[in-house]
Each structure stands twice: as structure tokens, then as C-alpha cells.
């Protein structure tokens, strides 16, 4: 589809999705969510895409939240439908089967933070601000934020962030585990690319199985999760990538993984 609110590019195994609404700090309206859903589906189905990077245009904002002009006009059932649709779009990142990296270059608030939380990893500029300010508007996070933040940073952090609606700096977000790596603004792109290159050098089938084991294991007791891990380990051991990885290690060379 033709995109009006996002930019989408595939190069060197990386699918880069950029929310491109700088005049409204890259806020998410329904049309933008539709375009993101299409781009995420394209990334998932394209075997040439090994890693997905999500970011926002400009230096001010990653995604500064949902479009309040749109939300303010909604009736309750319309708002519920929007939340369900937003959750389905954001959920595509978790079910991608490929590593996804949110490169937080500025404000990541409300729906912006929620979409970042659905990514496998998050990098951020030291100047970035993150938060879930929905309660200050009389609503609550609707795109999975209450659930993912608690799972990533723990219920104590989730309660503080959700109940206060405060913004937090990148240093604090990194301290509590919301952000994986932080960089000075001028080094964010290069630092994120270095992380992405590391992911690209790993076995893509192994990455997919590892992501599945982590995701499924979080929703069950540890012993049951370890059964899932055993299953994924066994499946990984049947792949051509496993044989190539082992051979490369023994031969003291870099592996040439073929995603098989």
C-alpha cells in the first residue's frame, strides 16, 4: 500500500519503519496504525528482512502518543475498538518471529512507549523521555502498556509509571530495564546499528526459537517454560543453520547462516 504517515525501507537485511508525522510529534492516529500493520506484515513475510528497526522522524519524538484530537471525539465503544485494533497492531511486533528494535530518538509517550515495549529490544538517546501519561487525560494505557511494562520492569515500576503518568528520562528507563542501551543523540543511530549488526550475525532460526521460548515461558510456571525451551532446543538442533554454526566454530570462521 502507499504510505502517507510512515516511511518503510528494506536494506541489508534490515526493515526500517519510521513514523513520519513530525508536525504532531509522530502521534499515532488510526490511519498510521493501519499503515504500521501493513509494514509489520510485510516485514514478517519478507525472508530478506532479518531484523526490524522502528523509529520516528526528527530528533524531538519517537512517537509522542496517540492522536488526542482523534481520541477526544470517540464514544466509549469506538475507543474500545480502537484499543483492540491498536493492540493487534502492536502485537504484530511480538509475533514477528524476528528481532525488533525500537530506536527511541525522543519522546516515547503513551502509545509510543507501548509500541516500543512490544519490540524485542529498545535503544534510546540520552535525551529521550518515556512515560505513560494516560491517567492525566482520564484514561489508561490501551495498547498493552499496563501488561508489557509490568512484565518487562516489574509491577512496582509499572504501578509508578502508570499511576503517576510522569515522564522519565532515558537513564531511569535504562536503570529499571525499560531500555536496553542508551547513547548520546549523535551516537544513537550508529549504536543501534551496531546492535542490529550483532543480531544479523546470529542464526535467524535460533533467534526465532529463542524469542518464542521467552514469550511463551513468561506466561507459565518456570518448569513448564523449561519444557518449551527443551522443545525449541531440539528443533534448533535439526536445522542447517545449527550444522553451519557448529562447523564455523570448529573451523574458526564466521558462520554463513541461510535461515534454514
Image: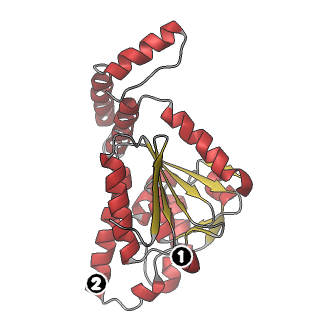
Report whether 247 appears left or right of 234: right
Residue at the spot of label 1: 133
Report whether 150 appears left or right of 125: left
- Front one among 195 and 8: 8
Residue 97 against residue 109 in the figure, above or below: above
Q: Residue at x 49, y 85 (%)?
A: 137
SS at badge 1:
loop
Image coords of residue 139 (percent x, y)? 43, 81
- Of all residues shown, which one is farthest toward the front? 2
Report whether 142 appears left or right of 88: right
Whether residue 41 appears in this view of the structure is yes
Q: Residue at x 50, y 71 (%)?
A: 110
Residue at the spot of label 2: 78
- Of all residues shown, which one is farthest toward the top? 251
Whether residue 184 appears in this view of the structure is no
Q: CA distance from mark 2 to mark 1?
A: 21 Å
Mark 2 vs 1, N-terminal side: 2
Image coords of residue 106 (percent x, y)? 63, 65
Amino acid at each position: 500500500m502507499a504510505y502517507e504517515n510512515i516511511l518503510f525501507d528494506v536494506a541489508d537485511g534490515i526493515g526500517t519503519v519510521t513514523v513520519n508525522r513530525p508536525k504532531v510529534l509522530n502521534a499515532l492516529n488510526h490511519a498510521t496504525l493501519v499503515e504500521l500493520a501493513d509494514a509489520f506484515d510485510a516485514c514478517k513475510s519478507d525472508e530478506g528482512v532479518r531484523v526490524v528497526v522502528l523509529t520516528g522522524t526528527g530528533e524531538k519524538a519517537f512517537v509522542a502518543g496517540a492522536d488526542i484530537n482523534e481520541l477526544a471525539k470517540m464514544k466509549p465503544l469506538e475507543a474500545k475498538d480502537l484499543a483492540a485494533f491498536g493492540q493487534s497492531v502492536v502485537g504484530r511486533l511480538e509475533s514477528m518471529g524476528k528481532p525488533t528494535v525500537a530506536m527511541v530518538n525522543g519522546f516515547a509517550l503513551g502509545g509510543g512507549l507501548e509500541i516500543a515495549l512490544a519490540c524485542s529490544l529498545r535503544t534510546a538517546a540520552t535525551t529521550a523521555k518515556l512515560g505513560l501519561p494516560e491517567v492525566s487525560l482520564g484514561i489508561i494505557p490501551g495498547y498493552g502498556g499496563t501488561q508489557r511494562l509490568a512484565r518487562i520492569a516489574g509491577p512496582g515500576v509499572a504501578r509508578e509509571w502508570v499511576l503517576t503518568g510522569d515522564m522519565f528520562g532515558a537513564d531511569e528507563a535504562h536503570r529499571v530495564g525499560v531500555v536496553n542501551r542508551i547513547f548520546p543523540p549523535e551516537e544513537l543511530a550508529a549504536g543501534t546499528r551496531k546492535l542490529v549488526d550483532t543480531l544479523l550475525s546470529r542464526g535467524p532460526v535460533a533467534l526465532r526459537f529463542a524469542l518464542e521460548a521467552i514469550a511463551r515461558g513468561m506466561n507459565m510456571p518456570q518448569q513448564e517454560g523449561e519444557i518449551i525451551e527443551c522443545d525449541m532446543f531440539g528443533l534448533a538442533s535439526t536445522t542447517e543453520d545449527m550444522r553451519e554454526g557448529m562447523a564455523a566454530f570448529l573451523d574458526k570462521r564466521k558462520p554463513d547462516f541461510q535461515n534454514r
